[in-house]
Image (spheres, helix red, strand yellow):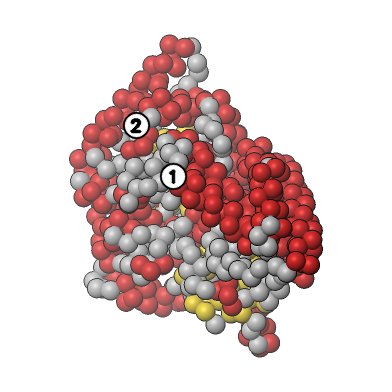
């Protein structure tokens, strides 16, 4: 049994599908002369299979998600078809007697050192695509995968990987995935966020798991406490299968409540909005009964593009999101690139020593005013498509740190409005809000509030910055905890400050969908939450079991506690009494 960080709740039992990190164990054995022809043939076969995967993926993603998202697989196919790519591999197999795996490894090394020297960001980003293609080829060559490759792609799988590359995450939509285990990553890494948005149980930070599990093994993923069991004994397997069935059953049952309003046990209405990464998530949000889109992370639009999406392309996407339910509010966040998300065409500096504290979000947008204006204009124009009576579009700025930034943002928006006016383009002015995710902004929030129309707490970042503990680093995940006493104190103050100023407040970090935190946030006075769509039914259910006086009492009690462990233990015990069946949706 192994223990990692539980990043998406629920329990899954299934067949493991390993996506091997080819760079872990390069094959150093040389080929015998008589093996060369067979090795070359193996390579060609793997190349054909990889190409056919990519074609299938491209058409599937294109029909299910969209043209833009599918484009990446076309790029990968052209890399695979590139003559010099295969020429090098063939030469190294026949001349240097390398195995195909070792040749691929050499190729990645060669390009890594080549691209490391180039200043061309676009080329450097292509290295990730090359790695992606090589991983795919490598999996077709791998002995471990071969016997199971066929069956594994057709059954619900538990994906085991070092980390999930962006394209792999997109491709996961192609196979039925019921669980995810990764060696790297943590609660708020983007692969985890995507797992949660699909309601897939996931555990991250399980170091060395790829050495302990093979494709075809039975594996148990316990997203409640982060346990991973490989080839469990029959009793354990049966027990977890039962839990898995309960988890699915409960999920279905709760989803059936989607039309019920979200209210607490004492009848206080709540707003449970959804976080989305693109158009494809809006349907899930609506199906789960979201009362609006509380956070549209627009950076995925840029991450899946190979060039800057222009104003009309962006407008079309925002319009599509609004069109699903024009009567619901939609909060569109401007580009939040930087940290762990980089786009090649913005001259983003991969060499930053502290990317999370560096050139990120609006800091980057300020340096690209023309580019930023394109997004502002697209959002203002999209607002016209919301139903004016009930639906509305709001614009949200990430990583706001200082007052001058809000002044600057307001000026940029006013200018975009003036330009649209002059050009005779239809647009609508929208409320402007700030993400509260930098402790400095939290401390001086009273001075910032007069300048914004609403606030959305980005607790994922707020917690990492307050605790000085990287949200993606499993080694410090014990510190990066939303239930840490200093976090709870700060959040309590933030809610009070906003209440006094009469500013609408939402929380859109991952803690909005975590039962223990949800109850405490209710106790603080928060009434609006935005979370992965998959969590809306369970939080709705939880709310119906908790009254506001109870939540306040629990918060009062917890605010006296001095350690995170104490808070967690206490809240776990309380939740068992409040809503025992929801423990399946809790993470440790
Ligand atoms: C957050 O920081 O809490 C947030 C919602 O934004 P992201 O996770 O995209 O940084
Ligand atoms: Mg954030």
Q: Is residue 280 visible?
A: yes
At 50% across and 46% down in the image, what residue appears? 114
x, y percentage for residue 54?
71, 48
At 34% across and 31% down in the image, what residue appears? 367
Q: Is residue 53 visible?
A: no
For residue 429, which quarter of the picture? top left
Establish if 128 lies above or below 559. Answer: above
x, y percentage for residue 524?
31, 58
Q: CA distance from mark 1 to mark 2?
A: 24 Å
Towards the viewer: 316 or 329: 316
x, y percentage for residue 272?
48, 51
Per the image, label 1 sits on a secondary structure element best described as helix
x, y percentage for residue 512?
43, 57
Per the image, label 2 sits on a secondary structure element best described as helix
Between disc 1 and disc 2, the foreground one is 1
Q: Which residue is mark 1?
A: 117
At 77% across and 52% down in the image, what residue appears? 48
For residue 570, which quarter of the picture? bottom left
Establish if 31 lies above or below 428. Answer: below
Q: Which residue is mark 2?
A: 367
């Amino acid at each position: 049994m192994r223990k990692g960080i539980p990043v998406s709740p629920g329990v899954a039992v299934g067949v493991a599908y390993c996506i091997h990190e080819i760079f872990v164990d390069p094959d150093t054995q040389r080929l015998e002369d008589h093996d060369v022809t067979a090795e070359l043939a193996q390579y060609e076969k793997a190349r054909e299979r990889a190409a056919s995967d990519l074609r299938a993926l491209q058409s599937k993603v294109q029909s299910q998600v969209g043209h833009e998202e599918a484009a990446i697989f076309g790029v990968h196919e052209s890399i695979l078809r590139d003559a010099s790519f295969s020429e090098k591999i063939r030469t190294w197999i026949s001349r240097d007697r390398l195995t195909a795996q070792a040749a691929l490894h050499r190729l990645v090394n060669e390009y890594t050192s080549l691209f490391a020297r180039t200043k061309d960001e676009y080329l450097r980003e292509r290295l990730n695509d090359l790695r992606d293609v090589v991983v795919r080829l490598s999996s077709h060559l791998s002995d471990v995968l071969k016997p199971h490759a066929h069956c594994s792609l057709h059954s619900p799988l538990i994906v085991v990987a070092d980390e999930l590359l962006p394209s792999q995450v997109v491709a996961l939509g192609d196979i039925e995935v019921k669980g995810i285990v990764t060696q790297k990553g943590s609660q708020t890494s983007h692969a985890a966020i995507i797992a949660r948005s699909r309601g897939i149980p996931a555990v991250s930070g399980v170091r060395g798991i790829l050495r302990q599990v093979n494709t075809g093994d039975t594996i148990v993923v316990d997203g409640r406490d982060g346990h991973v069991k490989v080839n469990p004994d029959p009793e354990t397997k049966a027990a977890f299968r039962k839990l898995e069935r309960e988890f699915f059953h409960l999920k279905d049952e709760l989803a059936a409540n989607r039309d019920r309003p979200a209210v607490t046990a004492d009848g206080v209405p709540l707003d449970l909005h959804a976080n989305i990464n693109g158009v494809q998530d809006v349907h899930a949000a609506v199906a789960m009964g979201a009362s609006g889109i509380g956070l549209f992370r627009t950076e995925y639009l840029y991450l899946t593009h190979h060039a800057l999406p222009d104003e009309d392309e962006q407008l079309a996407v925002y319009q599509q999101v609004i069109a699903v339910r024009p009567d619901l509010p939609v909060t569109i966040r401007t580009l939040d690139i930087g940290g762990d998300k980089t786009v090649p065409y913005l001259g983003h500096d991969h060499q930053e020593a502290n990317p999370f504290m560096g050139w990120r979000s609006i800091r980057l947008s300020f340096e690209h005013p023309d580019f930023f204006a394109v997004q502002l204009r697209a959002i203002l124009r999209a607002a016209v498509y919301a139903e004016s009576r009930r639906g509305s579009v709001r614009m949200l700025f990430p990583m706001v740190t200082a007052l001058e930034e809000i002044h600057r943002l307001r000026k940029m928006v006013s200018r975009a409005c003036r330009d649209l006016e002059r050009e005779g383009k239809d647009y609508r002015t929208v409320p402007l809000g700030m993400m509260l995710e930098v402790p400095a902004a939290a401390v001086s929030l009273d001075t910032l509030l007069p300048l914004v129309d609403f606030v959305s707490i980005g607790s994922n970042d707020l917690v990492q910055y307050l605790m000085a503990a990287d949200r993606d680093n499993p080694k410090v995940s014990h510190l990066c905890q939303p239930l840490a006493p200093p976090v709870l104190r700060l959040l309590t103050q933030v809610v009070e400050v906003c209440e006094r100023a009469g500013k609408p407040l939402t929380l859109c970090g991952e803690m909005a969908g975590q039962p223990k935190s949800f109850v405490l946030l209710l106790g603080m006075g928060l009434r609006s939450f935005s979370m992965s769509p998959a969590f809306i039914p369970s939080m709705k259910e939880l709310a119906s079991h908790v009254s506001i006086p109870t939540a306040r009492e629990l918060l009062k009690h917890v605010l006296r506690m001095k350690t995170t462990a104490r808070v967690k233990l206490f809240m776990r015990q309380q939740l068992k009494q409040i809503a025992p069946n929801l423990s399946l949706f809790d993470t440790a």
